[in-house]
């Protein structure tokens, strides 16, 4: 384990449960993420992965249990409250505005303004373009046409834009839902490299994937969920693909 793991976790979930009527989507789950650590969540559909990340990120209110950020208990009533505290979720659909540029997507809903003639408020497009250039360069991601709509970009490039937005707003925890799904192998490698970079910057990453190869390439630990409970937790360096599959399907 990295030395960062000796510090208190950046995110800790204790005895978290979420019930929808009689359905127990998540039951008494505890987990933690340290700075500079990638924790993978694995499990079949219906295992509770989506419920867990939506509860952490403010979409759902937990039925019971607690969430701690940097050792302090937190309660989120909206995803924006979670974002304001440094938890950013990048879903599979990326939530990008296809017709807008990288800069406009980074500032979506939080656009910088300047005053024309001292009193007419207008969009500060230069500030947006400068932020986009600096943020994407920080991720070692270079595009020649910053003003191009993101619909022109490939899947891997769009992932980089979504990650860049989280980095610009200084997210400390990035929750990534199937970030390599539907990407070709070269683009998968690029996204994996971006995640390693986030880790090197001391951010915590929760990585959800059905692709065990990607999980083993990027994660420090893996938590396997099955029917809303933790079926097992392993350090990647101390487990195998076969063991993880057995945990997922219920074998021992």
Image (cartoon, grey):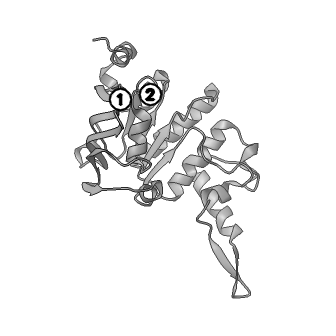
From the viewer's perspective, is 252 left or right of 127?
Answer: left
The reply to whether residue 133 is in sight is: no
Please identify the quadrant where the N terminus is shown: top left
Q: Which residue is drawn at the image coordinates 41% and 24% (left, top)?
A: 43
The disc placed on residue 222 is: 1
Q: In front here: 216 or 56? A: 56
Q: In front here: 203 or 63? A: 63
Q: Dots 2 and 1: beta carbons under 8 Å?
A: yes
Residue 40, position as x, y percentages in the image: 40, 32
Q: Please, is residue 81 above or below residue 39 in the view? A: below
Q: In front here: 222 or 98? A: 98
The residue indicated by pointer 2 is 215
Q: CA distance from mark 2 to mark 1?
A: 8 Å
Q: Which residue is drawn at the image coordinates 53% and 58% (left, top)?
A: 168
Residue 56, position as x, y percentages in the image: 38, 46
Q: Which residue is drawn at the image coordinates 51% and 53% (left, top)?
A: 167
Task: Tell me the SS state at disc 2.
Answer: helix
Q: Please, is residue 123 above or below residue 171 in the view? A: below
From the viewer's perspective, is 110 left or right of 239?
Answer: right
Please identify the quadrant where the C terminus is shown: top left
- Residue with the most extreme bottom position: 118
Q: Which of the 4 image quadrants contains residue 158?
A: top right
The reply to whether residue 158 is in sight is: yes
Q: Which of the 4 image quadrants contains residue 100?
A: bottom right
Residue 52, position as x, y percentages in the image: 38, 39
């Amino acid at each position: 384990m990295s030395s960062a793991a000796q510090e208190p976790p950046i995110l800790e979930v204790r005895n978290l449960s979420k019930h929808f009527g009689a359905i127990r989507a998540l039951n008494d789950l505890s987990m933690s993420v340290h700075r500079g650590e990638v924790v993978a969540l694995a499990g079949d559909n219906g295992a509770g992965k989506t419920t867990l990340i939506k509860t952490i990120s403010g979409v759902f209110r937990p039925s019971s249990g607690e969430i701690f950020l940097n050792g302090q208990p937190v309660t989120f009533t909206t995803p924006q409250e979670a974002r304001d505290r440094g938890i950013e979720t990048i879903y599979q659909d990326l939530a990008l505005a296809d017709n807008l540029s990288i800069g406009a997507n980074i500032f979506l809903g939080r656009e910088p303004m300047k005053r024309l003639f001292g009193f007419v408020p207008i969009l500060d497009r230069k500030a947006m373009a400068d932020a986009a250039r600096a943020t994407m360069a920080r991720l070692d991601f270079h595009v020649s046409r910053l003003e191009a709509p993101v619909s022109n970009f490939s899947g891997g490039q769009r992932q980089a834009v979504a990650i860049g937005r989280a980095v610009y707003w200084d997210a400390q925890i990035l929750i990534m839902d199937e970030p390599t799904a539907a990407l070709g192998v070269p683009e998968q490698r690029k996204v994996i490299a971006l995640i390693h970079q986030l880790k090197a910057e001391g951010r915590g990453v929760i990585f959800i994937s059905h692709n065990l190869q990607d999980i083993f390439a990027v994660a420090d630990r893996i938590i396997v969920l099955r029917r809303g409970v933790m079926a097992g937790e392993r350090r990647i360096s101390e487990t195998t693909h076969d063991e993880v599959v057995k945990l997922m399907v219920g074998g021992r």
